[in-house]
Image (cartoon, rainbow, N blue to C red):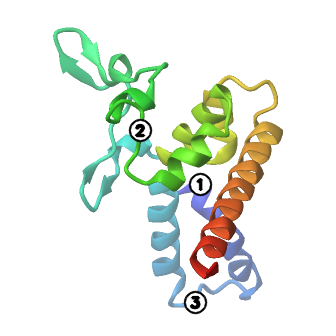
Amino acid sequence: METALLGPWSKSLWSTDGFLPVTAVSTLRAEARAVHRQLGPVWRRGTRHGRVLSLDAALGDGLSLYDLVVSEVDYLAHTAGGVFEDDRLNHVLRALNPVERAVVFAYAEGTTWSEAAAHAGATDPDAFGERVRRKTRRLAAEQHRRAELARTAP
């Protein structure tokens, strides 16, 4: 309640000549609920499809979710011999060096470019992630341009 009372919404309470408005109690309760939710651990919140779990959540036999997180994953090994069905993707990936390729695969897993570069071990993740993003866009645009030329050529 103390944190809720310190919020910016309470300034209107101090200028009411000693009388609280009728909506003050409901506003205080709503603010207290919001602050309580914000201060609670994120793994106690429910989502539409279940609960968010802490990495320390026990899975039995002394294992936790943290033990299941793999630091080094070769994403190309999960494909059929490192070759994708879409040849355009293969062309772009062949033009990247292994570190840039690792950044692209980490980005494909749902991270930002900076996080993907940090996962790949870049010393300056923001700059390296941005460089890889620009390079992949440039390679994809060049691939698209060549495909258009081949389609319109007689």
Task: Assign a secondary structure to mark 1.
Answer: helix
Compared to 41, does 150 lie above or below?
below
Is any atom of residue 48 visible in this view? yes
Asked whether, in this view, residue 37 is left or right of residue 112, the answer is left
Q: Amino acid at mark 1?
A: Glu
- Mark 2 / mark 3, whichever is N-terminal: 3
Query: Which comes sooner in the sequence, label 2 or label 1?
Result: 1
Asked if the residue under mark 3 is in contact with the one under mark 2, i.e. CB atoms within 8 Å, the reply is no
Q: Amino acid at mark 3?
A: Pro
Q: CA distance from mark 2 to mark 1?
A: 59 Å
Numbered mark located on residue 83 in the image? 2
Query: Is 118 placed above or below 58 here?
Result: below
Quadrant showing the C terminus: bottom right
Per the image, label 3 sits on a secondary structure element best described as: loop
- State how many labels appear: 3
Q: Is residue 49 left or right of residue 72?
A: left
Q: Position of residue 45 (x, y in %)?
A: 35, 51
In this orientation, does residue 7 appear?
no
Q: Residues within 10 Å of mark 3 (few under 14, many from 20)?
A: few
Which disc is residue 21 wearing? 3
Separation (CA) of disc 2 from disc 3: 68 Å
Give the percent coordinates (x, y) of residue 60.
Answer: 16, 16
Question: Does label 1 or label 3 sit earlier along the sequence?
Answer: 1
Depicted 68 relative to depicted 41: above or below: above
State the residue position of label 1: 2
- Specify the quadrant of the image occupied by residue 74: top left
Residue at x 37%, y 41% (from the top left corner): 43
**Quarter of the view holding residue 75:** top left
Q: Nearer the viewer, mark 2 or mark 1?
A: 2
What kind of residue is marked 2? Val
Nearer to us: label 2 or label 3: 2
Tell me which residue sits at (43%, 41%) in the image: 41
